[in-house]
Amino acid sequence: MKRAEFHDFFESLAPIILPVIHVISETQTSINIDKLIDAGIKGCFLINHDFDIETFLPIIRSIRTGYPDFWIGINFLAVTGLYAFPILTSLENGGCRIDAYWGDDARIDEREPHQAEAAAIAKTRKECGWHGLYFGGTAFKKQRPVNPKDYAVAAMLAADYMDVVTTSGIATGNAAEISKIATFRSALPDAPIALASGITPDNAIDYKMVDCFMVATGINIDNDFYNIDLKKLNMLISQCQKMEGSE
């Protein structure tokens, strides 16, 4: 996927805000999606931090039924696309469209000339015929550490196996080093990059070279892992609007 295609899809040249909802119930998820819709946000990711996939699936189905036109991506915690894509295909075949999958670890290994695991994930995706976008974690938090000197290689390799190369700071809520993101951008001038940790209304402008902000902590109610603070969200939206067309 090209950067221009990504921004055209979401109808904005600014970084696209895709909030991440840590799901605990159907009601809590619906309340937060309603906040997003009220704020003019076009999509979000749902993640199962607190329970297993089997518990998550009926909530996903119910949310899709209630929000048939809202853009919804999924993260199955600690599950690669190799296992996720068949599940997503089953959901899709059952009438539950999922617009994207975010895998924390896309199994890119910048130390190796051949990307066997990433290729296996890509093969599974193709064989399943699932139609959503793939956001693949690369040099990502809580995964195998990547030497900063290899960031550019990791980014370039990743672009061959996913739609949106997705990276982060060292942990949830931790901002990424700007130099890291600049290296990714330099390595991938034409591919979309998502940043999945540490974005706040105060620092967003520092990451204007990124195409997508996947954000939770920075827009959540203080000391609340599960619920969005509409004031913070609107502040982030305002900051992104200022970045329209700039880099």
Image (cartoon, helix red, strand yellow):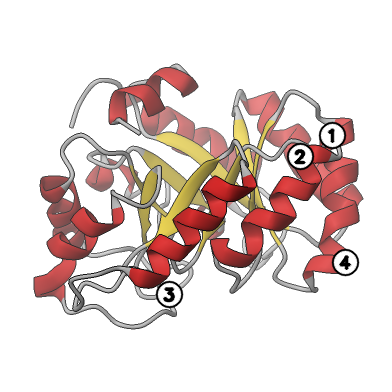
Q: Position of residue 207 (x, y in %)?
A: 26, 46
Q: CA distance from mark 1 to mark 2?
A: 5 Å
Residue at point 49%, 66% (across, down): 104
Residue depth check, mark 1 versus mark 4: number of the one nearer the observer = 1
Which amino acid, mark 2? Glu
Q: Are marks 1 and 4 in contact (CB under 8 Å)?
A: no
**Which residue is identified by label 2?**
92
Can you name the residue that lies furthest to the front here? 127
- Percent across and percent down for residue 76 are 66, 64
- Marking on residue 171: 3
Q: Residue at x 55, y 56 (%)?
A: 124
Q: Nearer the viewer, mark 2 or mark 4?
A: 2
On residue 55, which mark appears?
4
Tell me, yes or no, whether the two marked residues, 3 and 4, touch with CB atoms within 8 Å. Answer: no
* Residue at mark 3 to residue at mark 2: CA–CA distance: 32 Å
Outermost residue to the bottom? 144
- Residue at 10 percent across and 47 percent down: it is 186
Q: Amino acid at mark 1?
A: Gly
Label 3 vs 2, first from the N-terminus:
2
- Amino acid at dot 4: Thr
- Assess whether mark 2 and mark 1 are in contact (beta carbons under 8 angstroms): yes
In primary-sequence order, the first of circles 1 and 4 is 4
Callout 3: few (<14), some (14-19), or many (20+) C-alpha neighbours within 10 Å?
A: some
For label 2, the SS is helix
Tell me: residue 187, above or below residue 177: above
Q: Is residue 57 above or below residue 41?
A: below
- Answer whether labels 3 and 1 touch (C-beta < 8 Å): no
Q: Position of residue 211 (x, y in %)?
A: 33, 37
Vertical placement of residue 89 versus 37, above or below:
below
Q: Amino acid at mark 3?
A: Ala
